[in-house]
Image (tube, grey):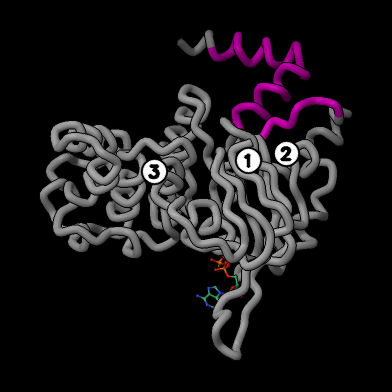
Amino acid sequence: MAIQLQQVSYTYAQQSLWRQTALHGIDLDLPRGSIVGIAGSTGSGKSTLLQLFNGILRPTQGTVSVLDITLHAGEKGPKLLPLRRRVGLVFQFPEQQMFAETVEKDLCFGPLNFGMSADEAKERARRAMLDMGLDLALLGRSPFRLSGGQMRKAAIASVLAADPEVIVLDEPTASLDPVSRTELIGLLTRLCRERGRTVIIVTHRMDELLPYADRWVLLSEGRAVFQGGVRELVADPSVLTGCGLAVPDSLRYWRAVADKLGLHDEAPRLTAEGLAELILSRRGGSAARAEDKGAGHE
Ligand SMILES: Nc1ncnc2c1ncn2[C@@H]1O[C@H](COP(=O)(O)OP(=O)(O)OP(=O)(O)O)[C@@H](O)[C@H]1O
């Protein structure tokens, strides 16, 4: 497993009279080399949960195991640097993680801190910028003189530059244009499928991640009310509405088609292209005629 939580609770402001318990008794198993989507309504505890994964927050109860590092409630110890080296976290608000004078210094910070040479760090920074589709001319600019979308991309690039084994992202596509959103999900999918990285994404846009996620965790009022694959979500979308989420369009379309064509045992097709291909293949002759017509126009 990449990440395991056993009976984890987290309470903010433990020293004061006012306490807010954001997470209650969470058990989680997130497999290595998978893409995991985390969803839940506002205030359900998603950002708090992510911050437990790289030790920014320590559990107030229970145990968090990340790769081979285990953090127990109340424990203080020298485990944070190795953990942060292996688990990169992209914050919900990118300005919370950009702090250096220039974008380049920001992107080099992780690689240098983890022992790379200056040249290696600069090369990593350059590659991460290109992966994120950012102009290299921005390397010399202050992160605070970037547009919202550029800053989000630079914040993601600063995590990718350190090449962590587990990449955790809090609403990474917010403030990105539709093309950049698709490209980012594509890049993260490749990092998972081709390089074995574990990718964990909090999202309010389930539709864009549904075709790629291996597993979903749904949170409601600080509790993990669902853990499973897309087939389970398709079978019972009421788990979504039960925690205040709308059923994503792609799930609704798939259910409508599967009901009509009696395809309940098929793997859900959650992209427009996948669904269209399936419908056409079921219509057989009509599909062939449509192709013939298309060829006739060439
Ligand atoms: N620093 C903090 N101090 C006290 N309470 C906090 C703090 N941060 C979050 N909370 C509370 O913890 C609960 C969970 O917050 P969290 O930010 O984890 O939710 P979320 O699911 O990420 O929400 P959103 O979708 O709005 O980003 C909320 O009730 C919130 O008010």
Q: Residue furthest right?
A: 262
Q: Ligand 1: does it lie within 8 Å of the C-beta at label 1?
A: no
Q: Residue at x 86, y 30 (%)?
A: 264
Which label belongs to residue 141?
Answer: none
The answer to whether the residues at label 1 and label 3 have Cβ atoms under 8 Å apart is no
In magenta, the rendered stretch is 265-294
Q: Amino acid at mark 2?
A: Val
Residue 232 location in percent, x, y?
80, 41
Quadrant of the rendered image containing residue 269: top right
Give the mark toward the camera: 1 or 3. 3
Quadrant of the rendered image containing residue 151: bottom left
The answer to whether the residues at label 1 and label 2 have Cβ atoms under 8 Å apart is yes
- The image shows residue 2, relative to residue 282, as above or below, that is below
Q: CA distance from mark 1 to mark 2?
A: 7 Å
Q: Ligand 1: does it lie within 8 Å of the C-beta at label 3?
A: no
Q: Ligand 1: does it lie within 8 Å of the C-beta at label 2?
A: no
Does residue 216 appear in the picture of this structure?
Answer: yes
Q: Amino acid at mark 3?
A: Arg
Tell me the residue that label 2 is attached to.
230
Which residue is nearer to you in this view: 68 or 182? Answer: 68
Tell me the residue that label 1 is attached to.
210
